[in-house]
Amino acid sequence: MMNPPFDEVDRRIVGATQAGLPLTPRPYHALAERLGLEPEDVMRRLRAMCERGVIRRIGVVPNHYRLGYRANGMTVWDVPDEAVDRLGAQVGALASVSHCYRRPRQGPEWPYNLFAMVHGRTRDDVERETERIAAILGAHNR
């Protein structure tokens, strides 16, 4: 099956969303109104672009500083490969974690395969949340 073309309407939708979706209860409807399209068409096209890989994902990217979270730190963990998906899902579900993902190890000098960005109002908050992650990983934390 051939991928549908990336047309001018898709281009307008991508251009209108690059700075973020409208902060309203129905962002796709607001976007559709601004572009002169039907909301269902905007949602269908965005879904299709995600499925084709034109758009990798649609997600929330909060401004942590504006929310009062002034401290943050990227934590890296060496977790057995067979447990990283399950444990990563638990770590990623924490309110203090904005990004949690698996990465390939880079030889013996960088054995880490689980990364989690932790946010807090203070450095102490971040350190407490890091200890919480270590507790979740338990014996799997090498």
Image (cartoon, rainbow, N blue to C red):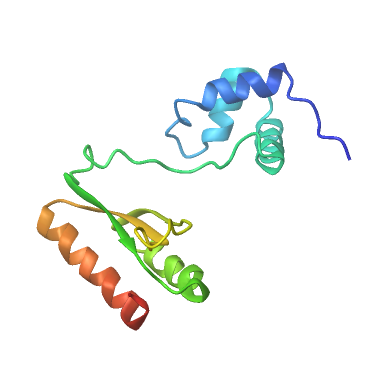
Q: Which residue is drawn at 25% across and 71% down?
A: 132
Q: Please determine whether, in this image, residue 136 is positioned above or below residue 4.
A: below
Taking the image as shown, residue 77 lies to the left or right of residue 122, namely: right
- Seen from this angle, which residue lies furthest bottom? 139
Q: In which quarter of the image is the N terminus?
A: top right
Question: Picture coordinates of residue 93 (x, y %)?
Answer: 40, 63
Question: Picture coordinates of residue 60 (x, y %)?
Answer: 43, 43
Question: Picture coordinates of residue 139 (x, y %)?
Answer: 33, 83
Taking the image as shown, residue 25 lies to the left or right of residue 116, namely: right
- Seen from this angle, which residue lies furthest right? 1
Q: Residue at x 48, y 43 (%)?
A: 59
Q: Residue at x 56, y 19 (%)?
A: 34
Task: Say which of 73 and 62 sits in front.
Answer: 73
- Seen from this angle, which residue lies furthest front? 108
Q: Please determine whether, in this image, residue 83 is positioned above or below residue 117.
A: below
Quadrant location of residue 33? top right
Q: In which quarter of the image is the C terminus?
A: bottom left
User: How many numbered marks appear?
Assistant: 0
Quadrant location of residue 105? bottom left
Q: Residue at x 81, y 34 (%)?
A: 3
Q: Please determine whether, in this image, residue 6 is positioned above or below residue 87.
A: above
Task: Say which of 116 and 65 sits in front.
Answer: 116
Question: Picture coordinates of residue 31 (x, y %)?
Answer: 56, 26
Quadrant location of residue 114? bottom left
Task: Say which of 55 and 84 sits in front.
Answer: 84
